[in-house]
Image (cartoon, rainbow, N blue to C red):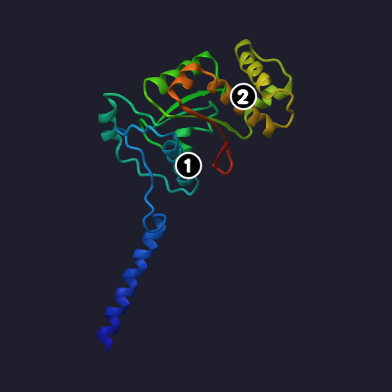
Amino acid sequence: MKRFSCKRYLVCFLLIGCMLALIACGGSGSNPKIHTAAELVDSWEAALQYLAEGNKRFIENKGITRNTNKEDRNILKDGQKPFAVVVTCADSRVAPEIYFDQKLGDIFVIRNAGNIADAAVLGSIEYAVEHLHSPLVVVVGHSKCGAVTGALSSGHFPENLQTIIDTIVSNIKDTTDLGAAIDNNVNSTVDLIKENHIVEEVGAKVIGAHYNIESGEVTFFN
């Protein structure tokens, strides 16, 4: 009986260990959806899932292990297949490769103060959706955005910065609330990108999103 009990306890211990391992990995049968550098993604829904799952990993401090850098560089030397274009702010706190938990070659990132869409941004998007075949464009604004705050201040800025502020002022219209202004700026940028003839021709999906710099969560707009 004593020997049988020891075996039974050992089996129970091993089962509990396996269950805890499954929970740590997100549950039985739940594998993280991770893009590989050689994979061409042609579905915007799949691309959005990559981003959503990556942001969830970031929030939960369960980021992927980046031990494929050498392998990825070897693949990427011959070209790139980013599954999404991300237009976002230049703010140092909002790096999309980090808050979407992605690797080399995964996302085509375009950043400027206030995440606006000027000619350079639109040209970069055209390249990504037409030549790299990225099926999804996401414009990400963020909480406590300094550029939008500046647009609400009615202040005067150096010439080049003023050009950005003027664009944001036009985007937010008569909004005075910072949170609403940030989202209005995103929505106006999304609308402008949607009107681009290259984006229309290739059928790329364009959506907006909001990144909360405190919680780390990205909320995607419908």
Circle 2 packing at 10 Å, graded few (<14), some (14-19), many (20+), is: many
Name above or below for residue 62 compared with residue 115: below
The mark that comes first in sequence, 2 or 1, is 1
Circle 1 packing at 10 Å, graded few (<14), some (14-19), many (20+), is: many
Left/right of residue 152 with respect to residue 131 in the rendered view: right
Position of residue 67 measured from the top left corner of the image (x, y, whole percent): 31, 41
Q: Secondary structure at mark 2?
A: helix
Position of residue 130 measured from the top left corner of the image (x, y, whole percent): 40, 20
**The C terminus lies in which quarter of the figure?**
top right
Position of residue 162 measured from the top left corner of the image (x, y, whole percent): 64, 14
* Residue indicated by mark 1: 52
Q: Secondary structure at mark 1?
A: helix
Q: Which residue is depicted at the point 51% across and 18% down?
A: 196
Position of residue 29 measured from the top left corner of the image (x, y, whole percent): 36, 56
Left/right of residue 15 with respect to residue 90 in the rendered view: left
Distance from Cα at disc 2 to Cα at disc 1: 23 Å
**The N terminus lies in which quarter of the figure?**
bottom left
Name above or below for residue 62 compared with residue 99: below
Looking at the rendering, which quadrant does residue 133 occupy? top left
Left/right of residue 37 with respect to residue 50 in the rendered view: left
Looking at the rendering, which quadrant does residue 150 occupy? top right
The three-letter amino acid code for the residue at tag 1 is Ala
Q: Which residue is depicted at the point 50% across and 46% down?
A: 59
The three-letter amino acid code for the residue at tag 2 is Ser
Work out which residue is located at the far bottom of the displayed protein and give it.
1
Q: Which residue is depicted at the point 63% across and 31% down?
A: 183
* Residue indicated by mark 2: 188
User: Observer-nearest residue: 133 or 214?
Assistant: 133
User: Observer-nearest residue: 208 or 104?
Assistant: 208
